[in-house]
Image (spheres, grey):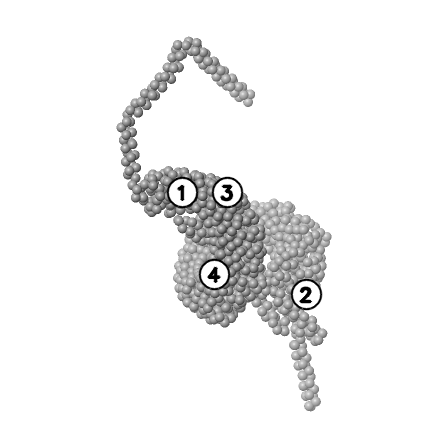
Amino acid sequence: MWNQRGLSLGLLLFFVIIFLVEATYTCLGVGNTTVLLHEQERLALLKFKHSVEDSSGMLSSWVGNNCCMWEGIQCDSITGAVESLHLRGDIEFLDFQNEKLVHEVYFSGYGTFYQVRDGCYLVANEVSSSLAELRHLKYLDLSGNYFQGSRIPNFIGSLTKLSYLNLSYAGFHGIIPPHIGNLSNLKVLDLRWNELLAYDMAWTSGLSSLEHLDLSFVDLGKAQNRVMVLYIIPSLKVLSLPRCGLSNADLAPFLNSSRILPNIKHLDLSFNYFEGPFPVFFQNMTSLSFLDLSGFDLSFSWNFSNLLNIIPSLSELHLSNCRLNNSHLSPHHLNFSTLSNIQHLDLSENSIEGIFPSALTNMSSLRVLDLSENRLNSSVPFMPNLLELDLSENMFQQIEDVGIWRQCNLKEFSVSFNYFDVERLDSTTNISKCSQYDLERLDLHGSLNGTIPESLGRLANLRGLDLSDSSLTGPIPESLGRLRFLKVLDLSNNQLTGPLPTFLGNLTKLDLSFNQLNGSIPESFGKLAALTYLYLEFNLITGPIPASLGRLVSLQAVSLYSNLLNGTLPLSIGQLTKLRSLDISNNSLEGVVFETHFANLSMLKHLDTSSNTKLTFNVSREWIPPFQLVILRLSSCNIINGFPQWLRNQRKLGMLVLSNTTISGSLPMWFQKLPIICFLDLSHNKLAGSLTNLPDGGNHHVSGYEFYNALFLENNLFNESIPRSLCRMTYLEYLDISRNRLTGNIPKCLENLQHLLTMRLSSNRLSGVIPTSVALNFSSLIRLKLNDNNFIGELPREFANLQKLTVLDLGENKLSGNIPKWVGEKLISLIVFRLHKNNFTGRIPLSLCKISYLQILDISYNNLTGTIPHCLGELNAMVRSSPIHSNNATLDADENVVQGMKGFDLEYTTTWDIVFNVDLSSNKLSGEIPVELTALSMLVGLNLSNNHLSGSIPDTIGNMSSLFSLDLSKNELIGMIPPSIAALNFLSHLNLSHNNLSGRIPTGNQLQTLIDPSIYVGNKDLCGPPLMTNCSNHEESTTTIKKRYDAGDESPKVWFYVDIMSGFVTGFWGVIGVLLFKKEWRWKLFRFAEETMDKIYVAVVIRVAKRKRGREAA
């Protein structure tokens, strides 16, 4: 018995050992023969992990030895070999499933800087060759990731066991490798939505098992053997070739086509180059159920009718943009027996107009109908079997015409961009005849005005409602809050007012942004347990952020910026474990932010608290945050404890904005070791020391975000010279280190920054000559500001290469020489040209008159001579009724220009682009003021003071209707002040002092407000208010002269008439008297008159006779 028990125990122990060994080798291999192989697979997967940037944590589970338990990996249940790699990202969904992803454009004081695409996907320079080690792989999906324009690797062709390969939406470029033809087991191949091309498609002949092929957007226009795609693969059932450059020749008959073509069930040939008669290619496709021929010209009626007759099996047909019109849908052209199977019909982007086609109402099988982007405008009939209807972008004017209340069975209805009168939605003609509505999704965005009707509350089954981008006013009706199935509500970009209503708890996305809603955020929002996205930005919402929001554990994005919120930031925000984006900027929040506010925000990528001037960040210098931020904006908040030490652990920053945060001292050493931050703004602080500690830890791609590459360090106390390390930032597009204390020369290596659009080095202590190499390599430069430094020498001739420049400011330096002619000949896009306070000499070049976009011309405080060019009156931007702007002004919101106006130097920032100013003051100009200058009707400021100008003020000065400031002082002007100057209704600053003007000062209109006598001082012959000199003496002398003239008035009048009579008598009798006494003269005169009359008579008679003969001949 004991032997039996021992034997049983021994057998049991043996099986336990075998089981443990089997379990242990699940991923490490089965027995010693496979351990090495599968360890190689595990290492290969880790190599792949290390080759990609995974900011979303897709591969975070790839740790430990059991690779079969890693997310996205499936192994063979027996051998443990890796068979499937599911690594699909979500780039492809960014534009199509907005409910699932954050997809927004954010704004700042600088303009639009970055686009957030906060999804889950990998980024890499290429697909790691380590995947070639996975020789047992049957399923590979890398779609929806970003491989940055790399090629599809050749080693893919070595994975011969593959049956599924999906590389769509992955950022691949270049030629499709023919090695893919080695994959004879492949059943699904998806390469769509990349930038691929092919020169030979013979490799497809090796895909003998292929059932699904999608080459959408692959350029096959120059490919040989491309017909093989259509005819050589007998197993093919799904074929998608939209936008591939195919033509009619590719649809020609081919060998054995009758045997092969019947297998295809799904065919997409949209937007290729097909034309002419409908090809017979389709006649053998008896199994075809899906067909997309969008972009094929079917305007010939026989094309359209033939299509429907030869493919009776179709259930889904897409004919978008096929030039169809109403006649093609008439009973004359349609055989309804051939339409009995069609369930999905797309006729969008055609020319169907007016009355709704009656033929469509007879298609009882129809479930989905798309008539968007046509010109329909009449009543839409009731179609009881229809489930989805799209009538967006038509010409409906009355909302009752689309029949929202008649369509009882519709589940999805889109009528966006039709511009209805929403007030009639509740009219008596729209009374419901349906006991209930099946409608789940209603899209009316861009169509409505007036108020939101309460009647929308009848649509009890609504899941999604979009009323955005309209002109809606009034409050949000309470009936919307009672829609218990509603998940997505978008009322953004309207003019809605009133408080935020209470909503039921099924909402996942609520967008009420860009309205005028007021009141506080209801505590009841804390009951919206499913809420994922909350957008309330750009409203008038007041009060504190409710602590109840901390209960919304599903929240991923909260945007409350640009409201009137106050109070403190609730600690409960730190409990939102799924939160990825928090924007509370531009409010009036106050209090202190501690580490506990971020305790559990491990998923946080975007944090923006900027423009809350009473909000203070007080976190420990030893704090290590639980998150890895991509965007951090704390501008115009208060940061204590110096430069934030916790940033040293943030390795994925793409945007860092700490402007105006009261930080001081030098940049810490560890800051230099951070990866390069694409957008870095530390401006308006008290940072000092060298610039050598700027981030220089290598480049990295921030997946999901698109940033401008910018460095803003203006308004600090940085000193020393510009470091050479700055020259390594070759990616920079915007560089602003102005208003610091930098010294030395501009380093020659700055020429490496060849992508620069803006460079501002102004208001420093830089010196030396401007290096010519900089100008040679900055062909993209739009704005260049070197003003307020100590530069010497002449304007470099190489600046003529900067032909995209709109702003050139070299003022307040020590530059010399003439103003070059090439400025006006080459820099024709200039809007601002400023040489204020330099040492330029010579004449003003006439070529400046050719700069048609010029709005600000400031060459004051130089040593220019000669006259003012008359052609300056032809500066187009200063003449036309509207400003002319350059198209390359992405960051103009941050531009500033100092201009002499109203007697002071004023800095224009946000309004600089509407300032039109000419300042030629403090030179040695002579001659008269050109009357042509008065044609500059857009001019706001004109300063010609402190020159040697002579002559009078032009009488047409009153034509300069926009003039705000006029300074003609300290010249040698003479004559009276033109009365038209009183017509300058916007004039608020006038200085005509220290000239030789005379006469009475004009009065009236705006001049009545200019009562400062100093305006006219130094003109001894001027009189009248506001001067103390009375014009009465002038009037008395004038009156005396007038009296003397009047007293002797009679005598001159008599002699005047005597002179007239004497002249008449002398002239008349001098001729007539001679004729009376000279008979021969009298006879010759009469004879001459008679001959002249005879000639005239003969000429007239001949002309009349010719005309009569001409009419008779006709």
**Secondary structure at numbered mark 3:** loop
Q: Which residue is mark 1?
A: 971
Residue at image x 34%, y 41%?
1020
Q: Are marks 1 and 4 in contact (CB under 8 Å)?
A: no
Q: Is residue 981 left or right of residue 896?
A: left
Q: Which residue is mark 4?
A: 717
Mark number for residue 132? 2
Question: Type of residue at label 4?
Answer: Leu
Give the image location of residue 1070, x and y in percent: 38, 15
Question: Type of residue at label 2?
Answer: Ala
Residue at image x 56%, y 58%?
727
- Distance from label 1 to label 3 (Cα)? 22 Å
- Distance from label 1 to label 4 (Cα)? 42 Å
- Distance from label 2 to label 3 (Cα)? 68 Å
| Residue furthest top in the image | 1079
- Distance from label 4 to label 2 (Cα)? 55 Å
Nearer the observer, 862 or 693: 862
Question: Type of residue at label 3?
Answer: Pro
The mark that comes first in sequence, 2 or 3, is: 2
**Secondary structure at numbered mark 4:** strand
Question: Which of pointers 4 and 2 indicates the residue nearer the eye?
Answer: 4
Q: Which residue is mark 3?
A: 845
Give the image location of residue 621, x and y in percent: 49, 70
Give the image location of residue 505, x and y in percent: 46, 66
